[in-house]
Amino acid sequence: MSAVILADDIYVAQNIGFGIIAAVMIVGALKVVTSKNVVHAALSLVLVLAGAAAQYLLLAAEFVAVTQVLVYVGAVMVLFLFGVMLTRAKLGQEGDLNNKNALLGVPVALLMLGVMSWVLIDGFEDTKLPQDGDQVSVQAVSDSIFKPYLLPFWALSFVLLAAVIGAIVLARKD
Amino acid sequence: MLINNFLLLGAVLFCIGVYGVIARKNAVMVLMSIELILNSVNINLLAFSQLHDNVDGNTFALYIIAVAAAEVGVGLAMVLLIYRNRKSISLDELSEMKG
């Protein structure tokens, strides 16, 4: 442990970027769970998911970041907005989105956050991420998917097939 | 950068999502909170993938994204079905399966 901190060890730009994106994500997530308007909550969720894609880029996972934008921000959010619009007659202020005992969630969440933060700070004190590496290449990811993790990939294909058929069967009018 | 930056961000998002699942009554809002939880897991997976210089974390993050998409599809189909039958998606009123 040297007392002198070299400028290369700090990564100012990454840390500032991380801080801004993380703040936006946390504010967005809080709006998702506290907003009284379903559509506003869905739009805040877009903010969180896009921020997560940016964090994936900071973590050198460019393919996952692109997939996140395509699948989450593109497809899943459209599904959510459809769900909101098909189940609500009017898109205005809704006063009754919370449970009777919603306040019970606050101590539960805070307790979990406290325990997890304590464990993480205790366990990883100042472990640094390696920052000099390149982005994870798409080739490496596909080699990993189609060589050692081929069986989960097949299982996942069946899950998707079952989900597609199940969604059609459930949602059609007959 | 410290790995704890990312892990603590994941923990915060996870706890916000858990609060949402507990506190929300609207079924669509509960599904959104579940998405928050799944994303926090993905951030953790990719952070450890970067820490250990190993691609497996990326692979499983992709699998989680696929499973989340399937889950949202089926979940919203069920919500639509419930809405069509009951004209309400309030989870408080779904008590038929209570023993």
Image (cartoon, rainbow, N blue to C red):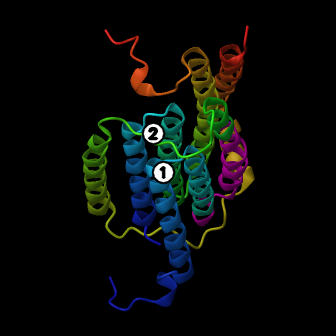
Task: Residue A60 in the image: state x and y as whole percent.
Answer: 62, 63
Q: Amino acid at mark 2?
A: Leu
N-term-proximal mark, 2 vs 1: 1
Region in magenta: A56-79
Identify the chain of the residue marked 1, using the numbered disc in the image.
Answer: A
Give how far apart the Cα atoms at labels 2 and 1 are. 9 Å
Instruction: Give the chain of mark 2.
Output: A
Q: Are marks 2 and 1 on the same chain?
A: yes
User: Quick one: SS at disc 1?
Assistant: loop
Disc assigned to residue A97: 2
- Dot 2 surroundings within 10 Å: few (below 14), some, or many (20 or more)? many
User: A158 or A32, which is in the foreground?
Assistant: A32
Is A116 one of the magenta-colored residues?
Answer: no
Q: Which residue is mark 1?
A: A35
* Residue positioned 36% across, 35% down in the render: A99
Q: Is residue A147 visible?
A: no
As for residue A76 lying within the magenta part, the answer is: yes
Drawn side of residue B1 relative to residue A139, left or right: left
Quadrant of the image containing the C terminus of chain B: top left
Q: Amino acid at mark 1?
A: Ser
The residue at 70%/37% (across/down) is: A146
Contact (Cβ within 8 Å) of mark 2 with mark 1: yes
Visible residue check, residue B82: yes
SS majority, magenta = helix
